[in-house]
């Protein structure tokens, strides 16, 4: 069910009005944090695609807030970069100017992460001290803040994997963990924000009349859950595509080298490692899951319109359909054009938006089910 934010039915009118204002204020803050995470995911995709992620070889959460301020500092950092395999094996012709080009993108990515931490911690403390947030939310949001700290550490753990001998990129496993934690934070903030902005209550008259059968909402909720599951799995598979650079191969669609089931899917690696490290298997799995996601989402849309959705459900249904079309098109175009940075980043951002839209739909379905007294 939607996150429980308290029952204020017995409070006075002024208390209820103040409570509504505070809930909306906190919800707006949480949605802003989710938007910042969306930008963070886009910056992370750009750093990976441009090879910028390994340009900063030091873990300096405080000192690293400032960029290099002298020529000597630039030379020192460039000297560190020249010691790692990415330079010696891939970028040995880099000059200091080339190094600065990749450095600034990674620095921006890390700086945005620091700003995200401040944007989380400072308002949370203020809401808490001024009593503008339900006390039951404090442990939950504190846990999410701690998860954000863990996410930062995992980010460095991921980067450090690229310094190992013969490694010119980061570990795809660590990349997927890093991306997964970001998506958990993103989804959690959206869900709690929706529960604050739209707490359970009596449904509007027009919503009840629009769909007299509660079973329709239950079925739609089931399809929304399935959509959330397959979209999440597809994004995880996309993380392995990014980590192994599998998108640079088999740049045709819908066939892969003229075959539906590509040759070399079952490579020499053990089965589970094959699924995550063999570029043929990695790209094929992502394609299959993306198509499965499209089928499940389309079925969700059909189920939604079949049961005449209320306005609160209709809007996310429409947005979900639009996001699906854009996302699938971006995926195909990214493959056909051999993963240009702009298309690949847009593809990753749209996947995150698609996930968020599915959460909005699921929340609206569960809220309607609860309001109508049906199982939810």
Image (cartoon, rainbow, N blue to C red):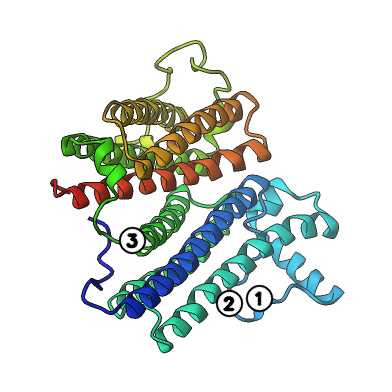
Q: Residue at x 53, y 18 (%)?
A: 253
- Give the mark nearest the N terminus, 2 or 3: 2
Instruction: Give SS at disc 1.
Output: helix
Q: Residue at x 43, y 42 (%)?
A: 235
Q: Residue at x 39, y 24 (%)?
A: 265
State the separation of the CA atoms marked 2 and 3. Answer: 33 Å
For marks 1 and 3, give the one nearer the viewer: 3
State the separation of the CA atoms marked 2 and 1. Answer: 6 Å
Q: Which residue, given by chain and number where applicable, does mark 2 sit on?
A: 61
Q: Residues within 10 Å of mark 2 (few under 14, many from 20)?
A: few
Q: Residues within 10 Å of mark 3 (few under 14, many from 20)?
A: many
Q: Which residue, given by chain and number where applicable, does mark 3 sit on?
A: 195
Q: Is residue 182 above or below residue 218?
A: below
Q: Position of residue 315 (x, y in %)?
A: 43, 40
Instruction: Give SS at disc 2.
Output: loop
Instruction: Give SS at disc 3.
Output: helix
Tag of residue 64? 1
């Amino acid at each position: 069910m939607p996150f429980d934010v308290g029952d204020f039915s017995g409070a006075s009118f002024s208390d209820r009005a103040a409570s509504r204002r505070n809930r909306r204020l906190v919800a707006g803050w949480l949605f802003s944090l989710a938007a910042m995470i969306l930008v963070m995911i886009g910056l992370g995709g750009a750093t990976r695609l441009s090879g910028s992620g390994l340009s900063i070889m030091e873990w300096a959460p405080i000192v690293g807030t400032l960029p290099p301020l002298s020529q000597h500092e630039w030379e020192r950092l460039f000297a560190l970069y020249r010691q790692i395999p990415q330079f010696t094996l891939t970028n040995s012709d880099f000059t200091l100017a080339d190094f600065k080009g990749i450095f600034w993108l990674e620095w921006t990515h890390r700086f945005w992460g620091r700003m995200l931490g401040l944007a989380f911690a400072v308002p949370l403390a203020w809401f808490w001290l001024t009593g503008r947030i339900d006390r039951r939310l404090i442990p939950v949001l504190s846990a999410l803040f701690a998860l954000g700290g863990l996410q930062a550490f995992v980010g460095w753990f991921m980067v450090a994997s690229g310094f190992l001998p013969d490694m010119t990129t980061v570990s795809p496993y660590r990349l997927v963990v890093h991306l997964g934690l970001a998506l958990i934070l993103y989804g959690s903030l959206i869900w709690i924000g929706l529960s604050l902005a739209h707490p359970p209550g009596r449904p509007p008259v027009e919503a009840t009349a629009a769909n007299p059968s509660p079973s329709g909402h239950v079925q739609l909720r089931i399809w929304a859950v399935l959509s959330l599951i397959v979209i999440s799995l597809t994004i995880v598979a996309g993380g392995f595509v990014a980590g192994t650079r599998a998108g640079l191969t088999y740049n045709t669609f819908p066939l892969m080298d003229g075959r539906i089931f590509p040759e070399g899917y079952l490579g020499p690696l053990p089965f589970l490692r094959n699924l995550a490290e063999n570029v043929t298997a990695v790209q094929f799995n992502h394609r299959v899951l993306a198509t499965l996601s499209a089928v499940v989402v389309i079925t969700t849309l059909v189920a939604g319109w079949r049961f005449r959705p209320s306005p609160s459900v209709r809007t996310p249904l429409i947005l979900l359909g639009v996001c699906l079309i854009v996302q699938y098109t971006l995926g195909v175009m990214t493959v056909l054009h051999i993963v240009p940075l702009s298309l690949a980043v847009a593809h990753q951002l749209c996947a995150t938006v698609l996930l968020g839209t599915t959460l909005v739909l699921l929340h609206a379905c569960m809220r309607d089910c609860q309001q109508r007294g049906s199982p939810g």
